[in-house]
Amino acid sequence: MKATIYDIAREAGVSIATVSKVMNDKGKISAARRNQILSIMQRLQYQPSAIASALTGKHTFTLGLLIPDIANPFFAEVARAVEDRGHQFGYSVIICSTDNKDERIERYMTVLKQKQVDGIIIGTGLENHAMLEELRSIIPIVVIGREVAPLDVPTVVADDYRGGRLAAEHLLALGHVRMAVLAESLLISSSRDRLRGFRDTIEDAGYALPDDSIIACGHGLEDSKARVMKLLRGGNRPSGLFCFNDLLAVGALQAAKESNAHVPSELSVVSFDNTILASVTNPSLTSIAQPMNQLGEAAVDLLLRQFDHGDLVHQRVSLRTELIVRQSTAAAHPLKLL
């Protein structure tokens, strides 16, 4: 069996606190005693475990990252940015894909606490605010990609409202006035902000976005494809469609193809995120770009700052979004404006 900190303390005739001080090079311990303990550790080939290190007040140099779906290119790119930034400072990252399910989130939270991670970045939907508040009381956390009002937690987001406005301004400039939205759950603050920015811009221009033009769906391709096929076969077919992420937009492109609605001459599609998907689809997607690398890096930086300074006053970092124009949008056909 591997030697433990208790074995070292027992053989040296000292407390585990003294062994911990030697491990961390702290405390007033004589050179002779320090060398004795180090010699025992070497002879027993003692390797401090992550949990033991945490119990003795030492960082485990691990971070937890909760995301909804690692298969979504947006979250995959953010996770990579978090990993890269963490590694720059000597931290490993444990990535947990939650599918936005509370029971899975709770299970992962328990696992991460057992592993004594130094901090957790939360990029998944979490409706259990009591759990989040309890977690924050024992470990530093940062929320990424969404708000958790009214809780006062450090947050890193993209400017989703501006992104919604940019999408609407682009479609309006192309002559589209009959538009629809393909949205993820509106329980998520980022989705609500994108919708609010899109709708405010359309209304400012003197048009309307009816409630039945706002289509909520899951985050998978099949669901978005089915919803858009139903929309295109209805009596009030839009000429412009704003999808709240690239995966939803890919489903929309598939639906358009099967419904014989040509993109972009008959249907212009704007997506959100600007992942690798946006540039490899046919046609390539006009997309609202989120700064994915910056999101991941800023989340890690904000978390590490808490290690140095303890509890922080609430900090909210908002990063700029921008419009990337590609092949999926074009001027509205005159007949579509009648």
Image (cartoon, rainbow, N blue to C red):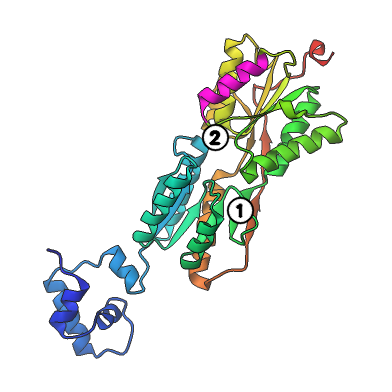
**Residue 186 sits above or below residue 223 on the image:** below
Q: Is residue 84 visible?
A: no
* Image location (x, y in percent) of residue 231: 66, 18
Up-down relation of residue 332 to residue 214 (above or below): above
Q: Going by the image, does 24 lie left or right of 255?
A: left
Q: Which mark is residue 148?
A: 1
| Residue in front for this viewpoint, 255 or 163 | 255
| Residue 314 pos. (x, y %) | 62, 64
Callout 1: SS:
loop
Q: Which residue is mark 2?
A: 275
Is residue 56 something one can see in this rendering? yes
Secondary element at tag 2: loop
Image spot of residue 41 (x, y percent)? 17, 74
- Please check the rendered image and state whether residue 227 is part of the magenta-colored stretch, yes or no: yes
Camera-nearest residue between 99 and 43: 99
Q: Which residues are magenta?
A: 220-232
